[in-house]
Image (cartoon, rainbow, N blue to C red):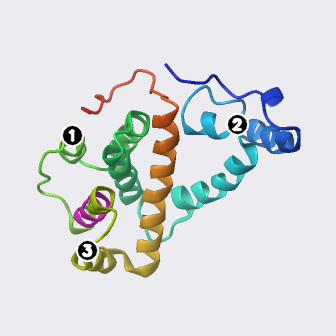
Amino acid sequence: MARIGPASREDVPADQREAFDRFVEERGGVPPSGPLAVMLNAPEMLERGEHLRAYLRGNSADLSSTIRELAMLVAARENDCQYIWHAHAAAGRRAGLKDDLIDSLRDKLPLTGISPQESAVVAYGQEYFRTRRVSQATFDAALKEFGVRGLAELTSLMGYYALLAFNINAFEMLPEGGEEAILPV
């Protein structure tokens, strides 16, 4: 069970109610759970983060939707974030990620038969999240696949999803049912 309930207009500071109202109008309501439900308690912060999210999720010219979904899954898996995993495993499958890749990533099994781009994403994300650094060889492999702009976007996308995972995990937001198996943690 989540540690907090949904944000309400009355609960946010008066000087942030306009940002609250804009978000609720754009989204058609207050999210009942998930990272945005947590972040809506600080509406101006959420509003600023939404600009970055929109860019990273849809405006990136250098990263395909498949690669973006894989990056989100790596961030979810490495942060043991059930909510993001639940949301993006199905989205990754729809974007074209192979079931074996997603299932092996979930279960922390060796990945086989993946493309050089997929391999670069997984190695880059796992190495950073596990060591808080990226070796030159791993960096160079990712740079070769994505170029400077693409690698900057990939790095920021994983970092943004780590921020979301921090909020979700700290506030104990869990996904509601669905087809995807939960992460073994």
Q: Closer to the camera, 101 or 40? A: 40
Give the distance between the C-alpha atoms of the residues marked 2 and 1, in whole angstroms: 34 Å
Name which of mark 2 and mark 3 comes first in the sequence.
2
Q: Position of residue 41 (x, y in %)?
A: 70, 36
Q: CA distance from mark 2 to mark 3?
A: 38 Å
Residue at the spot of label 2: 41
Which residue position holds label 1?
103
Per the image, label 2 sits on a secondary structure element best described as: loop
In this rendering, the answer to whether 179 lies above or below 36 is above
User: If the image is split into quadrants, where does the C terminus sit?
Assistant: top left
CB-based contact (under 8 Å), mark 2 and mark 3 = no
Which residue is denoted by mark 3 in the rendering?
Answer: 135
Please tell me which residue is depicted at 26% across the width and 62% down the height of the picture: 127
Mark closer to the observer (2, 1): 2
Badge 2 crowding class, 10 Å Cα cut-off, few under 14, some 14 to 19, many 20 or more, is some
Residue 11, percent from left and from top: 78, 29
Report the span colored magenta: 119-126
Amino acid type, label 3: Ser
Classified by dominant secondary structure, the portion drawn in magenta counts as helix
- Which residue type carries mark 1? Asp
| In magenta stretch: residue 143 | no
Q: Residue at x 84, y 39 (%)?
A: 17
Residue at the image point whose x is 36% and y is 38% from the top: 90
- The picture places residue 69, in percent across and down from the top left corner, at 39, 51
Left or right: where 88 falls relative to 59: left
Q: Earlier in the sequence, mark 2 or mark 1?
A: 2
In the rendered image, the vertical position of residue 47 relative to residue 146, given as above or below = above
